[in-house]
Amino acid sequence: QSALTQPASVSGSPGQSITISCTGTSSDVGGYNYVSWYQQHPGKAPKLMIYEVSNRPSGVSNRFSGSKTGNTASLTISGLQAEDEADYHCTSYTTSNTLVFGGGTKLTVL
Amino acid sequence: EVQLLESGGGLVQPGGSLRLSCAASGFTFSSYAMIWVRQPPGKGLEWVSGITTGGGTTYYADSVKGRLTISRDNSKNTLYLQMNSLRAEDTAVYYCAKPRTTGSSAWRYYGMDVWGQGTTVTVSS
């Protein structure tokens, strides 16, 4: 199972919006609405930000939103804040009864 | 407070073995499927293994199949990862994680809302 494809890095200024893409295949992202996104600060454990493509867990800011078109899922962060600077990882369920992660994207808030 | 606490990591030679533990507290452990995820130094996350609520069914990434074994003891609220025939590429921080909802299939679908702090495994001579 190949890893999902994410950009290595994205950046934006405070207040702006950014979008991180996560591209898979019809055997994972495109085949199921079971995409999750995690935020990870350096040296810390991942934190769930989005589940089932577009749902936010309780306590996660509504500045975070998720969507999917075909084999590509996206995470959008609006109104960028300094605290959003972190690594972001997508994951999807697959037809092989496994989970597959993306390579991770480093978000820099300029 | 819902909590997961990993232990058992360390330095091991190639070909060696190690057993990781994940102690759960603050929730009904036996109602939740569980998974292990690892993160090599400077790299992204990799799903390693999953196990159903009763432990009767297990799932593995191809990269670890036949060498790593997931298990659980619901009477002790503990998840395990037995690691045999270790290779340099197994070097990583290993996390255990709990899905958002109960049920044996939940680990596949609904996202992991609680993670441990991680335990580091280094495979080197």
Image: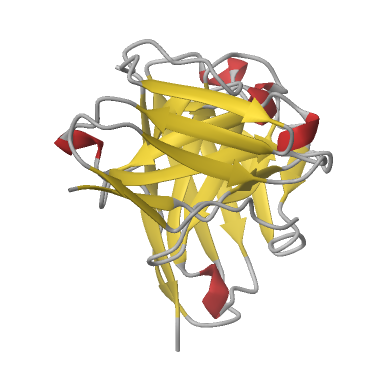
Q: Residue furthest top?
A: A58
Tag count in the figure?
0
The furthest residue to the bottom: B125
Q: Is residue B67 visible?
A: yes
Q: Give B43 or B92, whichever is nearer the viewer.
A: B43
Left or right: residue A7 compared with residue A94: left
Residue A101 rendering spot, x and y as whole percentages: 59, 47
Q: Position of residue B111 (x, y in %)?
A: 55, 26
Residue A67 horizontal side relative to residue A46, left or right: right
Residue A80 horizontal/vertical position (percent): 24, 31
In the figure, A22 relative to A33: above or below? below
When the figure is inspected, residue A33 is found, relative to residue A21, above or below; the finding is above
> Residue sitting at 60 percent across and 15 percent down?
B31
A94 lies above or below B48: above
Q: At x 68% / y 30%, what residue is drawn? A: A69
What is the image's colouring? secondary structure
- Please indicate whether residue B51 sits to the left or right of residue B37 in the image: right
Quarter that holds the C terminus of chain B: bottom left
- Within the image, what quadrant is residue B86 found in? bottom right
The front one of A70 and A2 is: A70
What percent of the width, then of the height, locates residue A70? 74, 33
- Quadrant including the N terminus of chain B: top left
Q: Nearer the viewer, residue A1 or B116?
A: A1
